[in-house]
Image: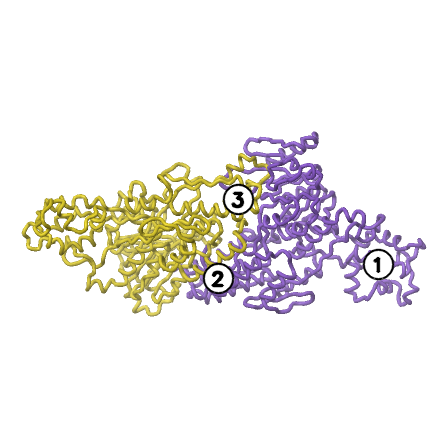
Chain colours: A purple, B yellow
Amino acid sequence: MRGFSVFQRVSRAFHDYPSLSKLLVVFTVSGGGLVAYAETNSVNGAQIINSSEVESKKKKVVVLGTGWAGTSFLRNLKDPSYEVSVVSPRNYFAFTPLLPSVTCGTVEARSIVEPIRNIVRKKSMDVRFCEAECIKIDVENKKVYCRSNQNNNLDGEEDFVVDYDYLVIAIGANVNTFNTPGVLENCHFLKEVEDAQKIRRTVIDCFERASLPTISDEEKKRILHFAVVGGGPTGVEFAAELHDFVNEDLVKIYPGVKDLVKITLLEAGDHILNMFDKRITAFAEEKFQREGTRPVIKDFMKQIGQTNRRALATDEWLRVQGCGNVYALGDCATINQRKVMEDISAIFSKADKDNSGTLTVKEFQEVIDDICERYPQVELYLKNKQMGNIADLLKVAEGDKAKESIEMNIEQFKTALSEVDSQMKNLPATAQVAAQQGVYLAKCFNRMEESEKNPEGPMRFRGSGRHRFRPFRYKHLGQFAPLGGEETAAQLPGDWVSIGRSSQWLWYSVYASKQVSWRNRALVVSDWGRRFIFGRDSSRI
Amino acid sequence: MRGFSVFQRVSRAFHDYPSLSKLLVVFTVSGGGLVAYAETNSVNGAQIINSSEVESKKKKVVVLGTGWAGTSFLRNLKDPSYEVSVVSPRNYFAFTPLLPSVTCGTVEARSIVEPIRNIVRKKSMDVRFCEAECIKIDVENKKVYCRSNQNNNLDGEEDFVVDYDYLVIAIGANVNTFNTPGVLENCHFLKEVEDAQKIRRTVIDCFERASLPTISDEEKKRILHFAVVGGGPTGVEFAAELHDFVNEDLVKIYPGVKDLVKITLLEAGDHILNMFDKRITAFAEEKFQREGTRPVIKDFMKQIGQTNRRALATDEWLRVQGCGNVYALGDCATINQRKVMEDISAIFSKADKDNSGTLTVKEFQEVIDDICERYPQVELYLKNKQMGNIADLLKVAEGDKAKESIEMNIEQFKTALSEVDSQMKNLPATAQVAAQQGVYLAKCFNRMEESEKNPEGPMRFRGSGRHRFRPFRYKHLGQFAPLGGEETAAQLPGDWVSIGRSSQWLWYSVYASKQVSWRNRALVVSDWGRRFIFGRDSSRI
């Protein structure tokens, strides 16, 4: 925290003397170094900057995070008029759906990660990566303060500052313990690659420990009882992987303990693999709220006046509410969806073209596409109420009149749409959502100038003209929960069905995600081959 | 240390009441558990014991360590009349010659390890493995005190005791810092799999750090300067691997820093790859002494009166001097070779069959094979002095007489052999020596009963009859130092030559070492394939 007063001084210096931001200013602070760095003037950056004249006019995009959201944004960003800096404490992207497989050695950790620099070097634009953590966002001066996360035998910590024109926040969220006492101290989480590696070592540890001569049968049973909390896809898959590991490999080398192994899956709901559907259809923020916003985000939210929330609130265009040119996506953000009722008068008067004070079905139909695009809850409401079209909605208010003769005033219109907002839902904190947001935002960035001239979004009901972009819409492409062996439960759009495991991988790698590189594909398949021939390794490394 | 008083009490209990050793005695000590365990009565062991009647007569062999020596002993032990317990804090054997390849990701750590339990389950004899560290050897009561090395979220430490009839100590040595200040704090060692993984992460760390925007060119050069201490095969190979890693993979993804990388190899001798030969031909204990004997060994040495030494002294049969039924091999031990001069009178009188007080060439020739087998320095001396046979040796003392007429008394005999002991040398602390010792000792154990009736060793000069076994003789099979790319320097019996790298692996896996399982062979080759196609991974995991 000591550093923050220094940041403030630095920020003030840049603020008071704007010319300083063009210079390389070096501060030396006793007990730690802080270097304020104006990127445009650098010649020492990791990426070679070709022409400083041209470069200095480029818009600076800073991306925080290399998870699903950040990486998918980076992969899809194509406009060479940006100068991109990616800041993340991890120099790789991890294909997290395979983490449960890593816990038992079915797939190696290294096979599911892709170095960010492999992605960076393939881009035909200025991108550079910094392995560092963002420790402060300075909205006023458009600066991001970063700290190298290396605390090895090299010198102590070093801080640096990166300027931005656009900031993309995709740093993820902490794990949600639902405030259950003891969870943090006694449980393993499965969120990062390191978690999976740790679980793998711990499982082997348990078997080694249960094989020690002094351990009683009672104690062995305790040691070999694995409890998995959460009956969602990840929990089910881990339990299934562990079951396979025990039955296919460990029984051979720990013959004395195989009958004592017990795997328990704990789920608060009625049945497993239920949760995800629930989330999608009726996501309740009270229940599935994103937990433990990181300190840097909390501080940032204070700056922009988002004090009552747990995650960064954005609008439907992923723009952080309360400040300009900052975007947030993935697990660290929630989309604060616009209510129809907030805009109901504006909608009515936009739709009532002839200013008659009443709305005909014809008038309504002319704006309905824009309404559905701007307020997706309308479409969902119609679908859930099994209404064929918007006329059915008006009928509810107007009774059984012939469609053409329906005409309603503002009060009737409010009544007709009064329940629509109940269909609003938050998106789940999944890889799929994050990846789609990344793609969406990159496409917006790629068309930033073009959309200025030719806006492509829906009509602005409160203002004039159209929105520059269509709002983000999530398309649920399905979900998998491998059940051990060759079986996989797949929730394709619709319900859960059973498919083969290879089909799952095919689906992952070909259709669902462009995040899987050919390298990852080949490595995972070769890991499967190795496991098929030699079994999983039980060495404690 | 608190536990030791408990050990003493336990030992005394077993000593005073021998019948106790047939019972399972459980002590509860506040603040930690100690369980004294009599193995023969166990039904809870990891290995199922088939018939307790037969089993109780089996000789108990306890092996400490799963490195080259311990594993090679275990692999070659075949006599089913033993009941074997292997105690080691690592549940795998690591093929250490490939450690330099692991440091840069040419080969994965997992590919060069073999779970000990894979070896155990293939043995048609009673073997069980305990993942624990030996913390005390009680010579008097033939017990080994062990402690589980798990300090994760399970209960605290647990101790147990294993009885032995034969004890095989193969726990290796600590790294030798030659007392150089700062080495322990600031250097990486390359001895264990974990070391290699840590070096790998550190190399990536350095590149990431050098790519941070605040780092000056000066500082970048400092960060990217890798110094390798030791110009032996491991040092040379690591430097070569690092060079390849930088030039084949890292230049592509860290283009800004590639020209700043510097690799320095430091060697005290005249030139690199020199050391090994020197060690073999004139191994000086002062210089290459085995460093930092582990505490358990120090304590053990105190018990048996070996107080002046740094490593366990054994005789040429690998038996620890000063106690019975304990063997030591690999890096933790040195063979205390018998001097000819110590036994010169006994040799003379054994050779002087007719008790004439003089020795003819004929008489000498009858015992020369036994002498050469018992005192290998004699053979080496003859070879180095380019003497064809033993008669030449006697000529030195007797001048140019005709061979048949040479006849010498004890004083002349002493003079003739006076310089022979200068040829004594210690074996280097290498994997090859450890592996050969393991094979040797296992073969002795396999023929233990047979050799009682038909001793196969050389004549006992001080006693009567013959030694049960031939003493251990090291056969140098060559040494490799891969030089990067496809080149490898190979020291085959003779001098260093250059061979291809695949030939090296072939040599390793087919000829030089039975320690390489088919699994390891396939995994390493598949790692090479992966690297060939995708390059080495630069993710920091």
Q: Residue at x 18, y 48 (%)?
A: B340
| Residue B309 percent across, percent down from the top left | 28, 44
Q: Is residue A28 left or right of residue B273?
A: right
For mark 3, does the 10 Å Cα neighbourhood hold few (<14), some (14 to 19), or many (20 or more) residues? Answer: many
Of residue B24 and residue B439, the one placed in the foreground of this image is B439
Q: Is residue A265 left or right of residue A18?
A: left
For mark 2, does the 10 Å Cα neighbourhood hold few (<14), some (14 to 19), or many (20 or more) residues? Answer: many
Q: Do discs 3 and 2 belong to a common subunit?
A: no
Name the residue type under label 3: Asp
Secondary structure of the residue carrying tag 3 is helix
Q: Marks 1/2: CA distance?
A: 57 Å
Residue A528 visible (yes or no): yes
| Residue B287 percent across, percent down from the top left | 31, 41
Name the residue type under label 2: Arg
Which chain is mark 1 on? A
Q: Residue at x 33, y 70 (%)?
A: B51
Task: From the image, tell me which residue sits under label 2.
Answer: A536
Task: From the image, tell me which residue sits under label 1.
Answer: A368
Name the residue type under label 1: Ile
Which chain is mark 2 on? A
Q: Do discs 3 and 1 belong to a common subunit?
A: no
Residue mark closest to the camera, 3 vs 1: 3
For mark 1, does the 10 Å Cα neighbourhood hold few (<14), some (14 to 19), or many (20 or more) residues? Answer: some
Task: From the image, tell me which residue sits under label 3.
Answer: B205
* Label 3 with label 1: CB-CB less than 8 Å: no
Q: Marks 3/1: CA distance?
A: 55 Å
Instruction: Indicate the quadrant where residue A324 lies.
Output: top right
**Earlier sequence position, callout 1 versus callout 2:** 1
Residue mark closest to the camera, 3 vs 2: 3
Residue B71 visible (yes or no): no
Q: Residue at x 90, y 55 (%)?
A: A352
Q: Marks 3/2: CA distance?
A: 30 Å
